[in-house]
Image: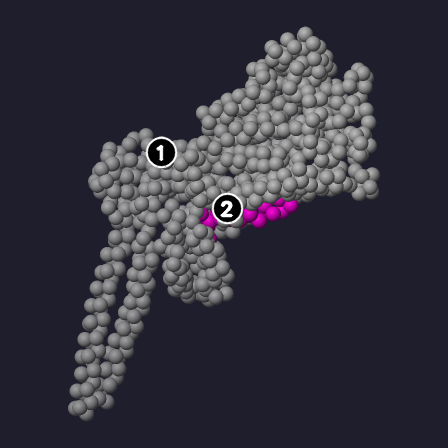
Amino acid sequence: MAEFLYKLGRACATRAKTVIAVWLALLLASSTAFFLFSGELEDSFSIPGTPTDEVNQRLSEEFDGMGGGAGTVVYRTEDGEPFTGEQEEAIADRAEQASEVSGVDDAVDPFATEQDRADQQQETEEGREELEEGLEELEAGQEELDQGRAQAEAAGMLDQVEDELDSEQAQIDENREAIEEQEEQLDRGEAMLEFSSEISTVSEDGATALVNLSFTEAQEEISQDTRDTVMEVFESDPIPGTEVDFGNDLAMSMPSLVSTAEIIGLIVAGVVLVVMLGTLIGAGLPILTALVGVGIATLTAMSLSDVLEMASVTPILGLMLGLAVGIDYALFIVNRHRRQLKKSTELQESIGLANGTAGNAVVFAGTTVLIALLGLNITGIGFLGLMGSVGAIAITIAVFIAVTLVPALLSLVGTRVLSRRERAHLAENGESDGKHRHGDEDGIRPMSTGRALLRSAVAVLALGIIALPALDLRLGMPDGASEPSDSTQYRAYSAVEENFGEGMNGPLLVTADLSGGPTDDAAEATAEEEQFQVAEELYSRDAVAAVAPIGISDDQSLAIFQVVPEDGPSSESTEDLVHTFRDLEVIEGTGPLGVAGMASGNIDISETLSDALPTYLAVVVGLSLVILLLVFRSVFVPVVATLGFILSYFAALGGVVAIYQWGWLSAIFGVDNPGPVLNFLPTLLVGILFGLAMDYMLFIGTGMREAYAHGTPARLAVVRGFRAGRSVVTAAAIIMGSVFGGFIFSETVMISSIGFALAFGVLIDAFVVRMLLIPALMHLAGDGAWWLPKWLDRILPDIDVEGSALEERHRSEQGSEEPVSPGAAPAEGPAPGGPPTR
């Protein structure tokens, strides 16, 4: 691979304009594909086969118009006074117009609903009065009959009138039975009204009203055109004296691909590059190539959005990764090329060698990230696998850009990739005065064992403390409370919470199987009794605010209820309530209840992702061990490097929980309403952080290995390898952290939490694990760090990640005495006490 990349680098350098033209053509083609084929991005997530999905499927089969998505429109008066008659009529008119929009099944007039409720209440009260009057008449009739029987018996005429009296008694008993039956029905009706008393569409003060919409398609399948058309109905002709807002189930906040925060992140990355490389041309080249790469990757991914159900966060994930790794991968090659130029290596030869050495490491590092991201498909969760695939596209393009476009641009800029002072010194002395000359390391010494123990203890303790909040991790999906405070979704969520209760922002849909009956009449009577029985049981739960029966299927086999929890859709009590209902069998022999709704769906997705996480983590850890075993030919190094990754992963999760779930430092990070952590973030973080951690391990660890393999004592090799790789890893981590960190201040909490997790995880892994913990543990292990059983050494392929063999071969051909790799000992022979040269 190294030789191939060497030839590829030289070929791209000699045909620079052609290579640049090809990449520009690809950028143009991806732009054209985007404009021609891009479709709508989704604002919700779904996993087929979850309990919620199964309930929705059954509802769509049993009930006409059920199983579709829902939407909420919130009207409020500007002065806080009750709606006027004219305003009520105007809102009803808007609801009627919305119901005629294609894709909308119904839009309910809130005032008509409240009037229906009032009518039912009035009918119940009138029914109770009539029933009491009937009972009084019945009691009076019974008393009169009893007196007549007593008089007849006293007169000795009971035998003559007994048949007539018995007939009258039978009639009274029949009437009493009918009244008792009516009373039972009336009691049930009154109880049902009591159960649903907290469900309303107009607030108590009459100043807030909810227009509830139902759609023909499932929530995640509602087109943006349908949503936009519905919102246009309510927004296009404002009702004087009112304000209108739209719930999170209707309005979609499309996160911006480019914002000020990301630009600031790029500026920080540019500053780091300038400081490290000392030249604007050298600093600008990695940023330019990264922008080309993310442009192609993002536009290509979004051009597929018409044929794939792609979440709005998916292309942004590709943008994050493409920018971060694109800059880093180009930096590795540019940095190696600059070092070689300062050693008086000829330009074209230096480009080829940089591509065959650093470029080889880039390909290997990119492959590890690629495999980890594609591995997200093994979770069996479609939208997560697609995120991984889009991220893999971005990584693949970044690698190809690094090994083709970067050499071409390096050829065009020539020695201007060096600073003026470096070029001047090179022209005068034939070799730059570069401060990275390896001969300057002659005076280095290994760290002391006591210091190594202290560093290890401090690193592990710090990571453990930071990871502690991860023990309280709760997963969920952002709701309206997580939206920016000036957004329509947040205003709608807050208005509903203040005027109707938290639970109205996430009502549950509960289904109950009914036992039926031998005849239609019997089944109907049984269904009514069992409907009340289920409603009563649901309402008896402490976390339930209200229950309203919605309907019974035509075959009397299924009843559905709307259940409003006491707390919001992302609360622990609502989650517990869903599980409680699903374990509850109210009617013996019919099976447990079913639960659906947006809150239930989000809970199911979170639990499915949680169940998939251990398997995926095990696969990634196993992959880590294998990759590092091949690279470092050691048992100890893969184990400690993988354990370090696990520590940095849980530390990153701990930081996310502390800020986004607990609300620590919320003012700094703009977390207005802490809540559950984004449900797919832990799984996504495994794949991305693993790949990036392996990158840093390669660039820190390979220098140690090469120094040891060329005769440097084990503990001295740790210091030399660390010094050789620390500057580039430091710069790479700061650049990646700043690029990811730019997304922390996104107005969309999904993007913000992902950006924070990646930025924090990368910085923790680079500076605490790779540059503090790993060198200390390697020192403590000494020669044992490089132990490998002989039988395993014989069967493992020798992977030359940094292209050392290529560099040594070309050095031999040119008679150069440049060391094989930074930090490695000279190749004249093994150092005293060291192993033989490999």
- Secondary structure of residue under mark 2: helix
Q: Which residue is mark 2?
A: 469
Magenta residues, dominant SS class: helix
Residue type beneath disc 2: Pro
Q: Is residue 524 visible?
A: no
- Secondary structure of residue under mark 1: loop
User: In which quadrant will I find the N terminus?
Assistant: top right
The label on residue 350 is none
Task: Give percent across and percent down for residue 173.
Answer: 28, 76
Disc nearest the viewer among 2 and 1: 2
- As displayed, is residue 70 above or below residue 7? below
- As displayed, is residue 205 above or below residue 131? above
Q: Is residue 51 visible?
A: yes
Task: Give percent across and percent down for residue 282.
Answer: 60, 17
The quarter holding residue 343 reads top right
Q: Which residue is mark 1?
A: 486
**Magenta stretch: residue 608 in it?**
yes
Residue that appears at 24% across and 85% down: 162
Q: Which residues are magenta?
A: 595-618
> How many residues crowd around disc 2 within 10 Å: few (fewer than 14), some, or many (20 or more)?
many
Residue that appears at 61% across and 36% down: 772
> How many residues crowd around disc 1 within 10 Å: few (fewer than 14), some, or many (20 or more)?
few
- As displayed, is residue 670 above or below residue 156? above
